[in-house]
Image (tube, rainbow, N blue to C red):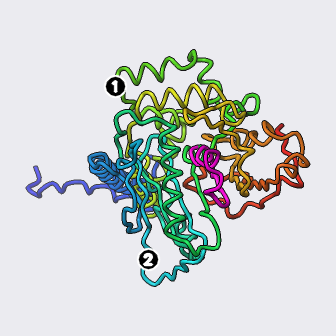
């Protein structure tokens, strides 16, 4: 027997890095590791953005006035001090440093929509209605509201308050070149129109952006919100939600309606955009959600008035509303120019609901002329909900020379 130690057999050499190992190259393994790391990092950043979003929503909804207005302002007149008190207020927006305002120019008055969220969307970024008004040197006023309604306030009381606010602005600018330029976004558009019908002598040009005025208008097979009332049986749900809230309707239900218009965007697309590019999207997402998720409340009577007279009754565009002061609200009584912005990409106020009030009131362009009115509309093909979008790339068309048809 040999006394020489048996040498262990040498192990096979490791495969070269370029050779397949379990069917995956080293480059593939590195790519997979990078993908997992990237997925984990994005997910952690995304969850942190959601955490910040939840914190800011809790902070916003804890305020009595949860405005997202980025400009400083001073309160001019509180609606709670009016003979018919409401939860609205008129404020003067203070121009940013370096902005020159000409007090002889027509004052701009922006009414913010109370359609579930808090005020401020008309001026929550520099490129906004307020920002553009300051850029042109106009004094700017803003009509906002508190989160909770005043006991007993009505829709007509709010419209009346708007007329008092407009009177106040006119008194503050006796040397102005004209009456206030009134801007109403979304829900505030029809509120501004109501005020202008009540006191047409108080307004200069009226601009309504994404504002529903012709509630039955639509195109067959599109814009599902038109069918909701019929499918669900009318107005009973609005009354039920108000009764369950002890006479108060939570604006979160309205936002839920808007979200349900496009569940794919609500549940996936909006979130995925942030996850896929958090560094770029987080600021935009947080700023928008700060407003979108800051819910306010309405009185049940207010919502019932809106449903009975506007969204189901369709009485505003057809001059069937007679307020308790005995005034019939007739859009044809407004002699100042009316500028209407709308978009085919706006699924909350599609173009027929924004524009068909013109067809409801006039048979022809000649009839518009006989009433001494100027109606201008601007139709965009793609931009989204107009109160928080820009339609500056659209080409305005005058209703004096164009008719409106929907196919």
Q: Disc 1 to disc 2, how far (Cα)?
A: 41 Å
Secondary element at image label 1: loop
Q: Position of residue 383 (x, y in %)?
A: 65, 53
Q: Is residue 72 visible?
A: yes
Give the SS element for disc 2: loop
Q: Is residue 207 magenta?
A: yes
Residue 21 in magenta stretch: no
Q: Which residues are magenta?
A: 191-210
> Where is residue 217 shown, x and y percent of the image?
73, 33
Q: Quadrant of the C terminus?
A: top right
| The label number, if any, that marks residue 245 in the structure image | 1
Q: Which residue is mark 2?
A: 96
| Residue reaching furthest to the left | 3
- From this view, report whether residue 249 is shown above or below residue 235: below
Looking at the image, is mark 1 or mark 2 earlier in the sequence? Answer: 2
Q: Nearer the viewer, residue 385 or 122?
A: 122
Q: Residues within 10 Å of mark 1 (few under 14, many from 20)?
A: some
Instruction: Give neighbour class at mark 2: few <14, some 14-19, many 20+ (Cα, 10 Å).
Output: few
């Amino acid at each position: 027997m040999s006394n020489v130690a048996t040498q262990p057999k040498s192990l096979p050499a490791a495969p070269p890095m370029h050779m397949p190992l379990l069917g995956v190259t080293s480059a593939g393994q590195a790519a997979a590791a990078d993908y997992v790391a990237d997925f984990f990092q994005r997910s952690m950043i995304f969850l942190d953005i959601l955490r910040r979003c939840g914190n800011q929503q809790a902070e916003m909804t804890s305020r009595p006035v949860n405005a997202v207005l980025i400009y400083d302002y001073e309160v001019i007149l509180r609606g709670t001090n009016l003979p018919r008190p409401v939860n609205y207020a008129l404020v003067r927006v203070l121009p940013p440093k370096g902005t020159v305002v000409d007090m002889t120019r027509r004052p701009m008055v922006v009414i913010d929509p109370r359609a579930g969220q808090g005020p401020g969307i008309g001026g929550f970024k520099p490129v906004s209605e307020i920002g553009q008004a300051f850029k042109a040197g106009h004094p700017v006023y803003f009509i906002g509201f508190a989160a909770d309604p005043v006991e007993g306030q009505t829709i007509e009381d709010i419209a009346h308050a708007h007329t008092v606010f407009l009177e106040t602005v006119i008194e503050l600018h006796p040397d102005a070149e004209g009456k206030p330029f009134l801007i109403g976004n979304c829900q505030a558009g029809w509120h501004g129109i109501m005020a202008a019908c009540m006191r047409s002598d108080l307004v200069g040009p009226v601009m309504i952006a994404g504002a529903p005025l012709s509630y039955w208008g639509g195109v067959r097979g599109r814009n599902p919100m038109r069918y909701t009332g019929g499918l669900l049986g009318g107005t009973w749900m609005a009354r039920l939600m108000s009764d369950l809230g002890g006479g108060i309707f939570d604006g979160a239900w309205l936002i839920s309606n808007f979200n349900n218009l496009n569940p794919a965007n609500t549940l996936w697309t909006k979130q995925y955009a942030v996850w896929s590019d958090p560094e770029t999207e987080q600021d935009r997402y947080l700023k928008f959600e700060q407003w979108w998720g800051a819910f306010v409340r309405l009185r049940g009577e207010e919502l019932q008035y809106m449903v009975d007279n506007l969204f189901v009754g369709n009485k505003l565009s057809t001059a069937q509303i007679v307020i308790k002061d005995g005034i019939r609200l007739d859009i044809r009584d407004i002699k100042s120019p009316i500028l209407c912005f709308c978009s085919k990409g706006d699924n909350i106020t599609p173009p027929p609901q924004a524009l068909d009030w013109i067809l409801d009131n006039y048979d022809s362009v000649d009839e518009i002329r006989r009433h001494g009115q100027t109606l201008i509309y601007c139709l965009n093909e793609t931009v989204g909900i107009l109160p928080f979008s820009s339609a500056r790339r659209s080409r305005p068309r005058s209703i004096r020379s164009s008719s409106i048809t929907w196919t």
